[in-house]
Image: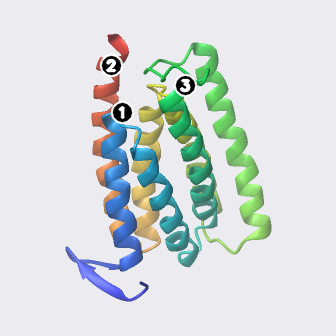
Amino acid sequence: MSETLTIWGFSTSWLELVSFLLSVITVALTIRQIHWGWLFSIVSSGLYAAVFFDAKLYGDMGLQFVFILVSMWGWWQWWRGIDGETPLHVARLTWQHKITSVFFWLLSFAALVWFLKTFTDTDVPYADGFLTAGSLLGQFLLSRKKLENWIVWIIVDILYVGLYVFKNLQLTALLYAVFVVMAVMGLRSWSKACQK
C-alpha cells in the first residue's frame, strides 16, 4: 500500500488515496447528520495515522487516535444523546462556551508545541501543534452537534492545505481544500437545522 502512484497529477500512495476517499464520505454524511459517518471516520482516522507517521506529522498522527476515540463517543452522542435516550440536535455555543473553547485551543496548542519540540523530530511543531489543537476542539464540538464546529473546521482546514503542501502530501492538501468547501456547506446546512 506504500507504492507511489499518480492521480490527477498528484503523487500519492494507495493508503493516502483510500484515506482520502473515506474522509470525503465521512464529511458528506456528517453534513447530512447521518450517524453512520462516524464509522467512516474511525476507519479513515486509523489509515491516516499511518500516512501522517510516514510524513513525521506526529501531532496529526496522534490526533487520529484521539479522533477514533472521540468518533466512538460522538457516534453514541448523535444516536442516543446525553441522557442515553434522546438524539442530539444542532445547537449553538453560549458566549461562555465560546470563550472556553478559544482558551482550550490556545492551552492545547502550547502543550502540544512543548511536547512536539521536546519528544519528536518534527520540523513543524508550531503548525502541527496549532492545527492539532484546533482539530481536537472541532471534533469535540462536532460530537456535541454544536454549529460552531464548522467555523473551527473552516479555519483549520484552510491552514492544513498549506501544511500538507509543505509536507508534500498533495492529495491530502487537495482533500483539505475540499473539506473547506464541505465545511462551508455544513455550516449553511446546520444553520438552517439550528433555526428550526
User: In the displayed structure, does residue 110 sit left or right of residue 193?
Assistant: right
Quadrant where the image shows the N terminus: bottom left
Considering every residue shown, the one lying at the far top of the view is: 196
| Image position of 118 with respect to 193: above or below | below
Considering every residue shown, the one lying at the far bottom of the view is: 3
| Image position of 48 with respect to 12: above or below | above
Is residue 170 in view from this perspective?
Answer: no
Between disc 3 and disc 1, the foreground one is: 3
SS assignment at label 3: loop
Q: Which colour scheme is used?
A: rainbow
SS assignment at label 1: loop
| Label pair 1/2, CB-CB below 8 angstroms | yes
The amino acid sitting under disc 1 is Gln
Residue nearest the observer in this picture, 189 or 11: 189
Residue at image position (45%, 60%) is 44
Indicate the position of residue 88 as horizontal and vertical percent values: 48, 23
Number of marks in the rendered image: 3
How packed mark 2 is, by other alpha carbons closer than 10 Å (few <14, some 14-19, many 20 or more), is some
| Cα gap from disc 3 to disc 1, whole angstroms | 14 Å
- Any mark on residue 193, and which? 2
Residue at image position (51%, 19%) is 86
Quadrant where the image shows the C terminus: top left
The amino acid sitting under disc 3 is Gly
Indicate the position of residue 194 as horizontal and vertical percent values: 37, 16
Indicate the position of residue 56 as horizontal and vertical percent values: 59, 74
- Any mark on residue 33, and which? 1
The amino acid sitting under disc 2 is Ala
